[in-house]
Amino acid sequence: MTTDTAHRYWNEEWRRADATSKWAKAEEEVLAHAARLPKGARVLDLGAGIGRHALALARLGCTVDALDAAAESVRIIDIAARAEGLPVTARQGAMTELPYPDAAFDHVLSWNVIYHGDEAIVRTTLAEVARVLRPGGTVMATMLSARRLPVERARAPGREISRNTWVFDGEGDKVHPHYFCHARDLLALFSGFEPISLVDREHERPGTWHWHILAERL
């Protein structure tokens, strides 16, 4: 069963998005870490959406590759990067098969992306992230917290299709599989990395718990 299918939903969302979208503003946490990267650092924005982080990091002096499984994402980012003359290369591809050589990047960012699939998808993706990062390079990612699961179950009927992986009835991207985890599961998944920080944080609405992890490639 293929479980990394949420890009089908997001492709249509990106088609409708504009500068007023909440997905158009870069996160301060992302920018703060990027400001500490050396000028010219090689960065992969994995699951780049409409390019809010890829473009912002390029403006800070990074050389950015933006990868997304949604074709509309790539189109939008390419137009924006060309318009500003930014060093951003947008490409369509799966997070489980990163089209880059070993140790190609100094930093990988993946904001609200890696949990779109079952545990096998998550493990494969993190192995690919480790492969394309140089030793000592950093990864910043968010993952769905198990603390959020009761909130989702109260909102809509759902079922666990495999370990920690849920789908929910109704509208939105959670009709596609999502992976929710406790800290112990997350740290086991990130076994190829040394954690620098790990925080369970609510996003824009009460109950929208996400793990925020910053880690170094071993």
Image (tube, helix red, strand yellow):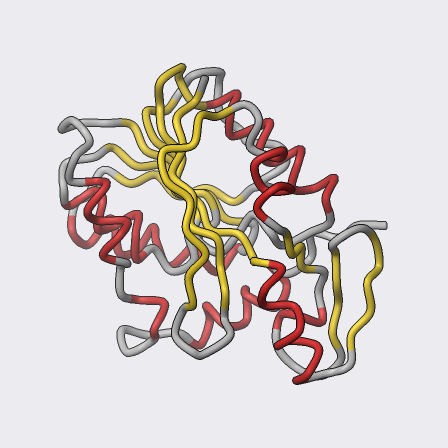
Location of the C terminus (image quadrant):
top left
Residue 23 higher or lower than 63, as above or below = below
Residue 188 appears left or right of 142: right
- At x 38% / y 60%, what residue is drawn? 50
Residue 202: x, y in percent? 43, 67
> Which residue is painted at 46% across and 41% down in the image?
91
Q: Quadrant of residue 175?
A: bottom right
The residue depicted at 37 percent of the width and 24 percent of the height is 105
In this view of the protein, which residue sits in the foreground, 87 or 173?
A: 173
Q: Position of residue 166 (x, y in %)?
A: 75, 63
Q: As displayed, is residue 19 above or below residue 108?
A: below
Q: How many marks?
A: 0
- The percent coordinates of residue 7 (x first, y second) are 60, 59
Residue at 66 percent of width and 84 percent of height = 155
- Near-viewer residue (85 or 179): 179
Residue 114 drawn at (x, y percent): 56, 47
Residue nearest the viewer, comparing 177 with 44: 177
Residue 163 vs residue 184: left or right?
right
Residue 106, image quadrant? top left
Task: State which quadrant residue 168 falls in.
Answer: bottom right
